[in-house]
Amino acid sequence: MDLSERKLKILQAIVGDYIRSAEPVGSRTLSKKYDMGISAATIRNEMSDLEEMGLLTHPHTSAGRVPSDKAYRLYVNSLMRKYELPEEEKKVIEDQISSNITELDRTLRKASHLLSELTKLTAFAMTPTQEDNRLKYVRVLPVDQKSVVLMTVTESGKVTNTVIKLRQEYDPAQLELLSKVMTHNYKGKLLTSLLTLDIIDDVEKDVAALGRIAEDVVPSFMRTLENILNVDLYIEGLDKIFYIPEYSDMNRAKTFMEMVSHKAELENMLLNRDSGVIITIGGEHEEEQMKNCSLITATYCVNGQCVGKLGVVGPTRMKYDEVSSVVEYLTDNLNEAFKMTEGE
Amino acid sequence: MDLSERKLKILQAIVGDYIRSAEPVGSRTLSKKYDMGISAATIRNEMSDLEEMGLLTHPHTSAGRVPSDKAYRLYVNSLMRKYELPEEEKKVIEDQISSNITELDRTLRKASHLLSELTKLTAFAMTPTQEDNRLKYVRVLPVDQKSVVLMTVTESGKVTNTVIKLRQEYDPAQLELLSKVMTHNYKGKLLTSLLTLDIIDDVEKDVAALGRIAEDVVPSFMRTLENILNVDLYIEGLDKIFYIPEYSDMNRAKTFMEMVSHKAELENMLLNRDSGVIITIGGEHEEEQMKNCSLITATYCVNGQCVGKLGVVGPTRMKYDEVSSVVEYLTDNLNEAFKMTEGE
DNA sequence: GGTTAGCACTCGACAATAAAGAGTGCTAAC
DNA sequence: GTTAGCACTCTTTATTGTCGAGTGCTAACC
């Protein structure tokens, strides 16, 4: 696609103006607002060409031009200048994110909230996937006579603790033994693969000395595995859509809301995305309901493993430069915060 | 307020009809639909009386009548019959709630989701307050050479575990000592009161042998306390408002959404409510933004302590009988599920 | 005296109509 | 290649008129 300097300039002006105003932009407005030394009529001709190339659309005969998804793509790829976040915003992000690094969940919730506030769009953050994660070791520690704590540690460094009430008293040596047996059997195995095993049977068959302790502990272990593998999705700023002209139509607002509220589907969609800051514009989406939305996501890493997603959804008309910068900066901060952490 | 049998009957019919249809109900409709042996004209006279008593309103001269908050209150207190949940719904609630009792957070999230689905309204659930909770004991347990797990147990039975990476290796005896010192010092103290203490200083001054371990552990302890005291609010079914005629006006929808999105304020409001199933109707609320909403909340108990709230918000026109039954049944199930649990 | 029928009146909802405004597309002149 | 001018298109907004539902009042009825 070869575009003259002038066409690019006009396109850029249209995209920029439309992103700001949400109104179709006409030739006259353009020639008045941006002093580019050519008349409205000339601009009309150029616009006509751009429309033929599929970069602009016409809501109806007598309306101004609106950028197509293709135009946004061109804008994002070549025309858009890098947007530098104002220092205050950087500071807010740093303050909010770096503060409590030990709490992944809470930090992610905070991150999505922040993302929504700064972009004025609906934002979300997903807890890390643990699909590729393997068991490092299991330990069962004493708490009191009839309670123990089950500690599960994965290779990626996620540590989970669960308190288990036993139906009988136990001998500390038994716990020691149980820890060893389980660790020995399952160390290095994928968490997902462990879910399908019949672990109680396994363990009891192995070591008769454990008695019935395994029966109390193993179900909790299985539940812990399930929980670790479970992904949560935090969504913030749903109310923001009321400020966006695109959703002043009740039906579109409803559709958007429903789409975002279907967490399971949204989750799936996010899981399928590549790493890095990714911008997907309207029709580029596979999913029918997303065809008039744009999505900007990024992947954050915990202990060097890139496993979680976060991002922003909005209408195709969005401030791609600002939003992607916020997403990027926030992700960088998260990565920094989660770099040295072990456990949640 | 003395009302004739007939007036009550008419009022009940109006409230019932309006709750179902969301349309002002006229005398003619009423006399046709409900065969109560009197003519529309008579009903008009009665309606006029009821309006004078402040039980009905008139959106405009030629519209039907609409119940006032006062009428809803009367309806809820005296006219409303107990609504028996259909067996399927009971079963759904039981299945969903009883399944994973060990996970308070997840269960509450599920509960609010369920509440929203069954009532078709926006629902929420709050994690338990721990304001009156006292520390039972603290234990620091070994994990590996440089990591320990800090276990905090409260009198209400809430157990929290945090993994802490130390900057140095430690002697198991030190952990034992630290546990004892901290437990001895702070056992039985309100969690809230502990937050204001200078615990590092306290502990180090007490026992020199601990060295710098306290410096690593105590901040995590403080953070754990903060987290325990923190209340989370899960909100579900925001999209439901799009199906409610009251919110087909964009502005009201927006206002509602903003109100519900202000978690901190909502939290405060909920904390101020009494126990049991409480219905507050429109103008009965203190808060300006709630004056055209009704709120049905209940309190659930963990280990016998009533500490958490959950409920439903919607327009004053809501199916009070059904909704309050769902809230009640769900709460009963939660109470049952949380009765025997220790820890989350 | 309570109840009912009848009728004038009110008001919102909806559709049809008209006018205004913005923008295009084409043509002819520069 | 660029520009001005003009007819044409289509949306937006305001206006009007009509319809229907519902009230409130009065007078008759049982």
Image (cartoon, coloured by chain):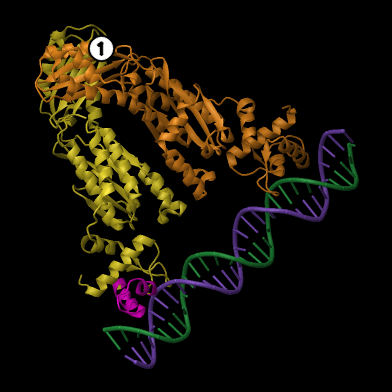
Chain colours: A yellow, B orange, C purple, D green
The one nearer the camera, B21 or A114, is: A114
Name the residue carrying label 1: B183
Q: Is residue A150 left or right of residue B293?
A: left
| Main secondary-structure element of the magenta-colored stretch | helix
Q: Does the magenta stretch include residue A29?
A: yes
User: Taking the image as drawn, is residue B228 in sight?
Assistant: yes
**Residue A23 rendering spot, x and y as whole percentages:** 40, 64
Using a 10 Å C-alpha cutoff, classify the residue at mark 1 as few (fewer than 14 neighbours), some (14 to 19) or many (20 or more).
some
Reply above or below: B328 against D5. Answer: above
Residue type at the position of mark 1: Thr
Q: Quadrant of residue A76?
A: bottom left
Q: Is mark 1 on a helix, strand or loop?
A: helix
> Which range of residues does the magenta coloring cover?
A28-51
Q: In which quarter of the image is the C terminus of chain A?
A: top left
**Residue B86 rendering spot, x and y as whole percentages:** 50, 27
Q: In this view, does A246 lie to the left or right of B315?
A: left
Q: Does the magenta stretch include residue B199?
A: no
Q: Quadrant of residue B220?
A: top left
User: Taking the image as drawn, is residue B344 in sight?
Assistant: no
**Residue A166 rendering spot, x and y as whole percentages:** 25, 11
- Please report the residue visible at 24 percent of the width from the left and 31 percent of the height from the top: A103
The one nearer the camera, B122 or A16, is: A16
